[in-house]
Amino acid sequence: MRYNVIFQPAGWRGTVLAGKSLLEISREAGVDIEVPCGGTGMCGKCKIKVEEGFFETLGITSRLTNVSPITEKERKLLSQAELTDHYRLACCAKIQGDILIYVPEQSRAAKQIILESGREKAFVLKPAIAQYSVKLNKPTLEDNRDDFSRIKDALGSGFIQFDKNIDIDYSLLTQLPDILRQNRWQANVVVWNDSEIIAVQPQGEEGLYGIAIDIGTTTIAAYLCDLATGSILARESLINSQVRYGDDVISRITYCMMNDGGLSTLNKIIIEDINVLVQRLTKTVRIEPERVLEMVLVFNTVMHHLVLNINPQYIGSVPFTSAIRSSCNIKAKELGIEIAKGGYVHCLPIEAGFVGADNVAVLIAEEPYKQDKMMLVIDIGTNGEINFGNKEGMLSASCATGPALEGAQIKFGMRAALGAIERVAINAFTKEAEVKTIGESMCGSISSQAAAKGICGSGIIDAVAELFKAGIIRSDGTFNKKIESPRVRQGVDGKVEYVLAWAPDTAIGQDITITQKDVRAVQLAKAALYAGAKILMQKKGVDKVDEVILAGAFGNYINKENALVIGMFPDCDLENVTAVGNAAGEGAKLALMNVDKRAEAEQVASFIQSVETATESEFQTNFYDAMFFPHAKDAFPHIQQILTAIPV
């Protein structure tokens, strides 16, 4: 018997023979799990979690009973809490049914490469948090004002912007008498938005700290900032732990709808991720998490709702309505986020439907709405956002590119980690391939320390583009069966495939191939992007793009020439195609550092016109035409010399 096995967050999926241990399967799949004892069941490091339930978008029902019973070794090495939470040791658990496995971060041997940096922008430092040093008179019988009034009066007399209506955080109020007396009536008063006192600290305890976080469907990037100087003190990132419940936002919505307590489960997971990042960031600079006074979050609309514990169900169906579109300020403690008790979380506004606060963050970082030229800004991810226009008007749209561009839904796909093929070159005459994995140089024979385990998003784009340029696949995406090369062969499913790396050169002991199904997955993803951009161009009444901005980790790593060759976006001079890294994270930092950027975000969210491309009458035609490489009809003069050289 063969059963379906899915490893998250690696995104690997395959069918395997019953009776194999999960450690054996992970090794064959190139999913790295810590196993210092070599798999003897002695170290207890290869902890994995068996997810239970029906996962509609994955098409499997995963149960704890679909792996072999718990062994005595596991009972000794796993805590009762872990056993209750369906943890197993990969070396002991054997497959006996369809299963979804989540590998927790502490068990992962290879850290995924997550892009944290963006194109940094100059800004004026104007945070919502300010600190004021005050010296108060001790109460007397003649002056028996309450403690809060003393602080308000001191702020009002020393700093002109304050009035008597300033508030104080309740949890702080409960501690205020002790704080003032222990510090002999001298303190630093921390005020949020000139309207609320959120902390009273001893004088000499300097430093104002805030955290900006870009919460993606797949990855999360966080930045600890000094709000007094504007400097970035630390960066951290991790995989969004929700990936175990599906690779895309529709999967997350479906899980909430199909499972009792689904929303609570996903909310708890993402809040735990945020708190892990807070702990890591503050540990790096040796401060307590309570010293963090504010946080700015950006995310797509579904992740926005899951973080705020709001039912995302109604975003997933027409008319794609969110619970709130405007920005909001929420006490961190209400969300379960462990920073200062009086600290706030600021969420940037949502545009509409699936176009969320992360897109607004990209826009306030890149500012296409201030330009004369017609700019196309694409944030490529599992849920892609497209923006087009200039200072005369901007349009935006969301497109479901799916997880293929991040390694999922590809036979040997994996996320960007050590050993993932990230670059491909194919000789048009010999049809031979050279590949580069993460961790080594471009070469034909792969070094053992970075031997190929699979292929990540940038490698997939390269591979498909190179297959097209070498004449191995046609413009409609089908393999050219006339090609005579040992690398072009019939796979076990009877369909043609191309061998990127031979088994002896890989870390998984089997040939790594690009299949017809893989090519189709790329076609669907790139056609969604192109069709979305084309709809926006048609609505603006223009037929060319002056500049293309590629945002996000995927946009940062892809070969822009190859992306244009397969038609991921309309033709543009490659000199005017720029990758800007994590622009959403950059926008989050700007909003943390300058409250005027928050006001600008509100204006942008209301100024930009959102388009639901899937409901446009021309969408299907545009989508079909965009399925071809680079396109069925549109001209690509800037790469025509490449297209002309493709062997017939």
Image (cartoon, helix red, strand yellow):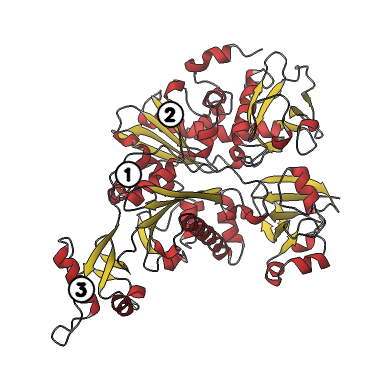
- Observer-nearest of 147 and 518: 147
**First in residue order: circle 2 vs circle 1:** 2
Question: In this figure, which residue is indicated by the disc labeled 2?
Answer: 548
Q: Which mark is residue 272?
A: none
Determine the CA span between mark 3 and mark 1: 43 Å
- Residues tagged 3 and 1 counted as in contact (Cβ below 8 A): no
Quadrant showing the C terminus: top right
Q: Work out whether 429 lies above or below 514.
A: above
Seen at 70% across and 50% down, the residue is: 7
Q: Secondary structure at mark 3?
A: loop
At horizontal 71% and vertical 47% (from top left) the residue drawn is 32
* Camera-nearest label, 3 or 2: 3
Looking at the image, which is closer to me, 358 or 224?
Answer: 224
| Image location (x, y in percent) of residue 13 | 71, 45
Whichever of callouts 3 and 2 sits on the residue coming sooner in the sequence is: 3
- The residue that disc 1 covers is 604
Give the distance between the C-alpha atoms of the residues marked 3 and 2, in whole angstroms.
57 Å
Q: Secondary structure at mark 2?
A: strand
The type of residue carrying mark 1 is Val
Residue under label 3, please give it: 136
